[in-house]
Amino acid sequence: MTNIQQQAPGTAAPAKADVAGYAAPDGASPIHWFRDITRTDIARVGGKGANLGEMTRAGLPVPRGFVIGVDAYARFRLDAGIGPALDRELATLNVDDSAALQAASARLRAIVEGAATPPALAERIEAAYHELCGAAEQDCLVAVRSSATAEDTAEFSFAGMFESFLNVSGGEELVKRVRSCWASTFHARVLYYRIRNGMAAEMPVAVIVQRMIQSEKAGVLFTVDPATRNPDLMVVEAAWGLGEVVVLGQVTPDHYVLDKKSLEIRSRAVNRKEFMLARTDAGATTRIELASDPRADAAVLGDAELRALGELGRETEAHYGAAQDIEFAEAGGTIYLTQTRPITTLGTGQGAQTPNASAASASSPLLQGLGASPGIASGQVRVLSSPSSSAELRDGEVLVAPMTSPDWVPLMRRAVAVVTDSGGMTSHAAIVSRELGIPCVVGTREGTRRLTTGQVVTVDGKAGTITSGAVRAPGPVAPTAPAVVGRAAPITATKLYVNLGEPDRAAEAAAMDVDGVGLLRAEFMLLSALEGAHPRQILQEGHADDLVQRFVTHLRVFAHAFAPRPVVYRAMDFRTNEFRGLRGGDRIEPHEDNPMIGYRGCYRYVREPDLFALELRALADVRRELPNLQLMIPFVRTGWELRECMALIDASPLGRDRGLQRWVMAEVPSVVHWLPEYVRMGITGVSIGSNDLTQLVLGVDRDSEHVAPLFDERDPAVLAAIHAIIAQCRRLGVTSSICGQAPSVHPEYAEQLVRWGIDSISVNPDVVDLTRRSIAAAEHRVLLAHARDGPAEAGAGGDGVSGR
């Protein structure tokens, strides 16, 4: 019988098991013990660290440990004097040039790993390590893992991208490995993922130090079936030895499906495990071949273990209030949970579905594997053995590989589907394919041998089949709507919009249960249209008309996909440091010490009306056919600059368009004073940018890792500003919305915004379903309160977000 080692928060850990609850020292920075951390501490300890602390406080069986906070990296960067060197490298970074990206990554990591850790910081780290080991075991084995502030959140998983170091022993070795974790934030795959997702090139990273569990078996538990998105089923995948073989897709693990309510086993697929990874007595990892071992074809988990895991899965999901992706390990008959994260892919589109999908599935398959990411797509096969052959893969081909790792992500973005020899539902290929919304079949065993480059196949990511030939559609096919987990989406009075920026995701997002686009970012479209050049450089070269037409093409994609639903386009809001990275930008753009609050937004349009005129021409061209496209002006500081900007719009072809809605972003606190004047000028909508508003209310540069722990969208001062803006909009009779990061990251934000009377909320595509349900629940509670207590002022009842 498997034991589940648990304990109440704040109690001492049993001597026989390394579980959470280790008595904290004084708690002073930079060391943060698990028992002192909650899920709200992402800014201090990163996503992974915050989850481990939250699990610990919930009484879940977590190996004990601590986190070296992001402030430690900031201190190291400053005291070691490496900041200028890092900034120089990042200023010229080009993630689309694979060779240049790899070279820059190597230089960045060498800068970090070659610097000396400040002695005072090293002493604190070593002291915490010895405290963790205990007096009887001064040099225990620990796992050292990176924990980024955007990792393992509802928005981004960063699946497998950061470095981990296992079986680290000794304080001196630990300090060295901490530097290696810091350096891993500059791996080429991390830089590519971050920048492609619109994040900063350098982000704070914390480091987790945790007692090692020498697992005899390990795996991953999904509390919702990620293939069918059925909330009544849980999926467990497991293999012998260490869990890396499951997460990295190195073997095809056993696959179990459980009924979430009864914990009965619905299905059990026991696969052949060719090898396992284990630890030697010296702490090294060794590969053990299982060809002649009876364990190769034996079930890893028994019924009692599966039931125990199911109970833990239900408990974890109930605690977080959302579907979870949970890593576990078992040693000596005890189950430990080593990580949990939100499942980031339940709202993703289903790939390139076609009307003839059933016919494709009915054909005799060439190969059968595990359907890991739903959808059907056809294309030519490209068999690759390593990501170093990336130049061979053409857009729209089916990528066939032995397995994938984070280094494969740039290739996967170009593929129409992915097929791997090994791996399960929780492998890297499966997780990333679901994030990208492309079909994926894993665990085919012989895909790289049976399929040949140039062969045309159809991949069914739900059925897990690869069939010969292409599924042909009679004409253009609209993508199918993403499956909602188990229940019909509720109808809400508060409109739900989506934030977008990349044209190739427009059709997929338009199929979701959303009321339109609340934030259409100009930046991704402009980067494509500009083809790497500064817009003024293009003007000087005489190619302004070409630039406008390229931009019109991108805008039309969004407006057409969502018509007649509104699409609110935020005008170009590059900062000077971002413009400097474009061809010709270094001689055109001024240098600013703090470009975040510098020459940008509305003021820039007033100073450079010829560039702003290009955007207005493109908008006017699209609106002649698609009048659902609207305009939003970002970073408006004062009334006089908006007045000048509105005059530019009036003088443009858009000025004659009486149906045009003119919005402003509420990012600068001065909007509370100026809003009545803005409305008199003709503004009809206000969208709160919670990121910049938080920065300016709290005086925190959100690009500075030194003050990152102070950035908190739930601070009462920020909430008071948001409440005041919504209240002003209600009094003035204009639409209020929010498009900042906060509602996407903190679901509880939605309820407070509804209580204050906001008209719409715009979130990232992956949290559309969760936010719609949060809005519905909030509206229901408001109605009940109104019926019970009578009408009250919007927002009465205090702060329901910060918990302070």
Image: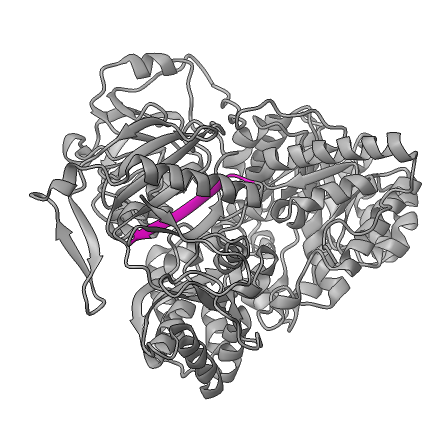
**In this rendering, position of residue 693 left or right of residue 587:** right
Q: Residue at x 32, y 26 (%)?
A: 267
Q: Is residue 296 above or below residue 128?
A: above
Say whether residue 241 is visible.
yes
> Within the image, what quadrant is residue 576 found in?
bottom right
| Image quadrant occupied by the N terminus | top left
Residue 155, how many percent across, how many down? Answer: 54, 46
Q: Is residue 11 above or below residue 488?
A: below
Q: Closer to the camera, 649 or 223?
A: 223
Question: Which region shows up in magenta?
Answer: 322-331
**In this rendering, position of residue 466 left or right of residue 81:** left
Q: Is residue 143 above or below residue 152?
A: below
| Image quadrant occupied by the C terminus | bottom right
Q: Residue at x 42, y 60 (%)?
A: 19
Residue 640, how many percent across, how many down? Answer: 87, 57
**In this rendering, position of residue 801 left or right of residue 561:** right
Q: Closer to the camera, 92 or 318?
A: 318
